[in-house]
Image: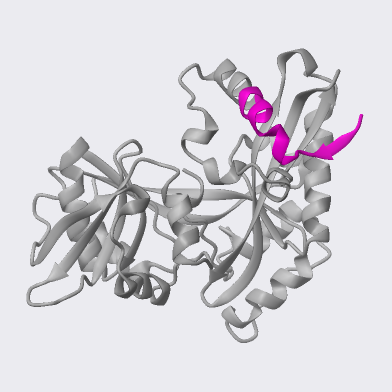
C-alpha cells in the first residue's frame, strides 16, 4: 500500500470519487465542490491536504485533514478537522482507511497540531484515539416559543452568501466577542460560501451599526454563526424562525449570557459533545492551565487520548472543573 498526498491535477478525479462514495449511502448527497469548493482548490498545497491510496492508478481511498487555529477563552489551540473519510466499494476491508487516518494523525502531529475533531460514529473512530468530550447547549425554538420574545431592535436580512455586506464594524464585533476561529474576513467568506445562507443583523433604535448579527442556514434550520449582544441574537432568532417554523443554534460553554437570554424561549434544550483526539497532551495542558481555578488538579499528560480529552474537556461525573471547547457550526455544516 502506498499513501500519497493528492495533487492539484487530481481534483476532478477525487471529487468524482468522493461523490460516488458518499452517494452510496446517501443518494441525495451533494457534490463537495458545491458546498466546500475552497477545500479543493486545484493546487498541490490545497489538494495535498488529502491523503489517498490508489489501485491500478485510480484513487480508491481518501482521508482529508484541515488545520486551523482556534482561540478558546483567549487561549490559542492548534487544531485540525478530519473529513472526506472514504473508500471505494471494491476496496473495502483492505485497511486503507485505517492506514490513511493513522498517517493523517501522524502528519498533523508533525505539523504541531494539538487537537483533532471529526464527525462520525464513535464505534468507528474510538480505536484511533477519538472520544466524545466537551459539551455545548443546543436550544431549539419554534414560532410559538419565540412569539413572546421582546422586539426593540430593527432586524433585517443584509444579504445572502459570501457576498453579504459584512461591515468592518460587524467584523470587529465578531472578533471581540470570541469568534473561536482565528481568520481573516476573506477566509471567513470562503467558509460562508460553502452553504446557502443569509446574514441577518439587529440594530438598536438610533444606532448606526448593529449590536448583533448572525448567519442563518435555511437548509439546516440553524444559526450557524453569530456575534454580539445576546438580546440582539434572540431577536434575530425570533425573525428567522418564521422561515421554517423551527430553529436551533449551538451555544458554546463560554456563552452563558447568550444561553440565559435564549433559555426562556426554547421549546427544548439538548446537550451535545464533540469527537476529539489529543495529539499533544502537554501542550493542551499548558494552553488551558490558566483557565482552571487555583489549586485545581489538571489531567495527567501520560493518559491515553480518550481518557485525557474526557478529563480535560469533560463532561465529568465528579463535577471537577473542565476546560471550555467549542467547534463552531459554520466550520463543519
Question: Along the horizontal axis of the image, is 157 left or right of 64?
Answer: left
Rendered position, 33 above or below 323: above
Q: Residue furthest right?
A: 1
Residue 306: say if magenta.
no
Place residue 19 in its image quadrant.
top right
Q: What is the image's colouring? A: one colour
Residue 131 in view in this figure: yes
Residue at the outermost bottom position: 294
* Along the line of sight, the residue nearer the viewer: 216 or 157: 157
Q: Quadrant of residue 39?
A: top right
Q: Horizontal and vertical percent for residue 203?
A: 16, 68
Part of the protein shown in magenta = 1-17
State the image coordinates of residue 95 (x, y, percent, origin top left). Answer: 84, 27
Q: Give the residue displayed 77% in from the left and 43% down from the top.
A: 128
Which of the two residues, 154 or 129, is positioned nearer the viewer here?
A: 154
Residue 9 falls within the magenta-colored stretch: yes
Amino acid at each position: 500500500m502506498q499513501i500519497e498526498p493528492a495533487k492539484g491535477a487530481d481534483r476532478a478525479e477525487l471529487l468524482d470519487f468522493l461523490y460516488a462514495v458518499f452517494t452510496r449511502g446517501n443518494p441525495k448527497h451533494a457534490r463537495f465542490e458545491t458546498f466546500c469548493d475552497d477545500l479543493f482548490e486545484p493546487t498541490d498545497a490545497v489538494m495535498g491536504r488529502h491523503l489517498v491510496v490508489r489501485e491500478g492508478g485510480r484513487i480508491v481511498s481518501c482521508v482529508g485533514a484541515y488545520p486551523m487555529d482556534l482561540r478558546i477563552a483567549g487561549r490559542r489551540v492548534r487544531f485540525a478537522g478530519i473529513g472526506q473519510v472514504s473508500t471505494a466499494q471494491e476496496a473495502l476491508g483492505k485497511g486503507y482507511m485505517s492506514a490513511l487516518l493513522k498517517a493523517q494523525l501522524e502528519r498533523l502531529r508533525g505539523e504541531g497540531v494539538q487537537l483533532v475533531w471529526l464527525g462520525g460514529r464513535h464505534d468507528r473512530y474510538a480505536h484511533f484515539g477519538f472520544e466524545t468530550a466537551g459539551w455545548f447547549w443546543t436550544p431549539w425554538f419554534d414560532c410559538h416559543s419565540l412569539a413572546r420574545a421582546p422586539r426593540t431592535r430593527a432586524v433585517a436580512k443584509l444579504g445572502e452568501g459570501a457576498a453579504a455586506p459584512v461591515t468592518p464594524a460587524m467584523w470587529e464585533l465578531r472578533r471581540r466577542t470570541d469568534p473561536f476561529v482565528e481568520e481573516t474576513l476573506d477566509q471567513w467568506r470562503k467558509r460562508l460560501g460553502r452553504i446557502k445562507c443569509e446574514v441577518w443583523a439587529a440594530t438598536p433604535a438610533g444606532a448606526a451599526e448593529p449590536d448583533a448579527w448572525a448567519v442563518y442556514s435555511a437548509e439546516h434550520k440553524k444559526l450557524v454563526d453569530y456575534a454580539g449582544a445576546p438580546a440582539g441574537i434572540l431577536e434575530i432568532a425570533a425573525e428567522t424562525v418564521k422561515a421554517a417554523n423551527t430553529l436551533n443554534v449551538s451555544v458554546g460553554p463560554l456563552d452563558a449570557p447568550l444561553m440565559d437570554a435564549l433559555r426562556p424561549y426554547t421549546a427544548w434544550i439538548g446537550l451535545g459533545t464533540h469527537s476529539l483526539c489529543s495529539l499533544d497532551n502537554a501542550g493542551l495542558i499548558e494552553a488551558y492551565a490558566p483557565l482552571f481555578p487555583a489549586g485545581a488538579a489538571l489531567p495527567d499528560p501520560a493518559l491515553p487520548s480518550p481518557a485525557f480529552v474526557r478529563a480535560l474537556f469533560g463532561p465529568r461525573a465528579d463535577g471537577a472543573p473542565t476546560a471550555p471547547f467549542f467547534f463552531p457550526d459554520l466550520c463543519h455544516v
